[in-house]
Image (cartoon, helix red, strand yellow):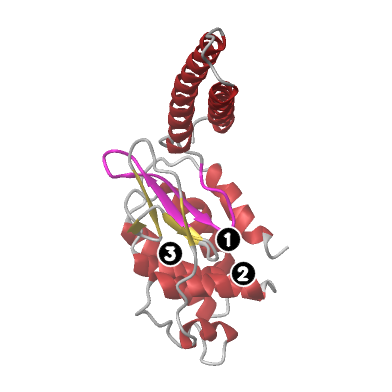
């Protein structure tokens, strides 16, 4: 049940049809309302506001999310996950809030001094691992309000995909390990494999030609009455070595070609 909270929000977001873009002020206003509901111990209002943030407002945000607001959203999610009994993901969200806005400290009325989530602000701020996502063919990508392709591996994040005009085409709250929204990326891996196939294939063809030439030279030498067994053995060794290199390169070219076809537009 606890982990399904983020999944539900992501599913809700995918069904939203935005009639008007959401302004930063509207998003922050609802974040403040959720914080007030938490302070007032109004569980239903808190859940409603949180669902509205992640499932309705974020998908319709037109501009870059302020990192300070992103941090507050991460804390709200942490509080919800902790209340649902998911301590691990709650702490991951709290650490995301700390990482996004290192100088921000949650007010005591939102996060009490003895709350276990306070550890995210009292312990050393860990760098954490990141993974570069594919570069969009058009536009750009941002995580938690920062334009970058480096996504945190061990923390949830707010991802935004921007169109060429700089407006957000997609904004989503992603839990740890959740896949990126679908988008058209520059196929760098495929292009690298195509280059590999072309290069290895060309080198293989050249080496094959050299092997064939060495073979012809060997037979020509064999027909000569002055050829020694040592001369023939040397020609044979050269021919065999070039044949092995040629076969290896051509096999490598085939492997790169198959890889390019398998991964497609990546």
3 or 1: tag closer to the N-terminus: 3
3 or 2: tag closer to the N-terminus: 3
> Tag 3, which secondary structure?
helix
Residue with the mark numbered 3: 30
Spatial CA distance of label 3 from label 2 is: 23 Å
Residue 135, compared with residue 173, is above or below; it is above
Q: Quadrant of residue 72?
A: bottom left
Residue with the mark numbered 1: 176
Which residue is at a point 61% across and 69% down the rendered structure image?
Answer: 89
Residue 229 in the figure: left or right of residue 265: right
Residue with the mark numbered 2: 89
Q: Say whether residue 178 is magenta.
A: yes
* 201 or 223, nearer to the observer: 223
> Tag 2, which secondary structure?
helix
Highlighted range, magenta: 158-181
Q: As drawn, which residue projects farthest toward the front?
A: 226
Q: Position of residue 249 (x, y in %)?
A: 53, 28
């Amino acid at each position: 049940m606890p982990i399904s909270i983020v999944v539900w929000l992501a599913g809700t977001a995918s069904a939203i049809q935005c009639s008007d873009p959401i302004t930063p002020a509207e998003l922050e206003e609802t974040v403040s309302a959720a914080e007030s509901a938490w302070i007032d111990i109004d569980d239903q209002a808190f859940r409603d506001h949180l669902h509205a943030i992640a499932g309705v407002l974020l998908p319709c945000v037109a501009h870059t999310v302020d990192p300070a607001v992103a941090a507050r959203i991460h804390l709200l999610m942490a509080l919800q996950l902790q209340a649902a009994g998911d301590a691990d993901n709650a702490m991951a969200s709290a650490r995301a809030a700390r990482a996004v806005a290192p100088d921000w400290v949650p007010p005591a009325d939102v996060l009490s001094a003895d709350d276990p989530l306070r550890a995210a602000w009292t312990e050393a701020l860990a760098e954490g691992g990141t993974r570069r996502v594919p570069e969009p063919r058009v536009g750009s990508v941002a995580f938690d309000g920062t334009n970058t392709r480096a996504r945190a591996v061990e923390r949830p994040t707010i991802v935004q995909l921007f169109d060429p005009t700089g407006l957000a085409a997609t904004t989503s709250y992603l839990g740890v390990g959740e896949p990126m929204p679908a988008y058209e990326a520059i196929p760098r891996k495929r292009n690298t494999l195509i280059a590999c196939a072309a290069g290895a294939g060309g080198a293989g063809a050249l080496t094959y030609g050299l092997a064939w030439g060495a073979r012809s030279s060997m037979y020509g030498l064999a027909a000569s009455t002055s050829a020694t067994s040592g001369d023939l053995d040397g020609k044979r060794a050269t021919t065999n070595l070039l044949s092995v290199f040629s076969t290896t390169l051509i096999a490598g070219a085939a492997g790169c070609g198959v890889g390019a076809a398998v991964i497609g537009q990546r």
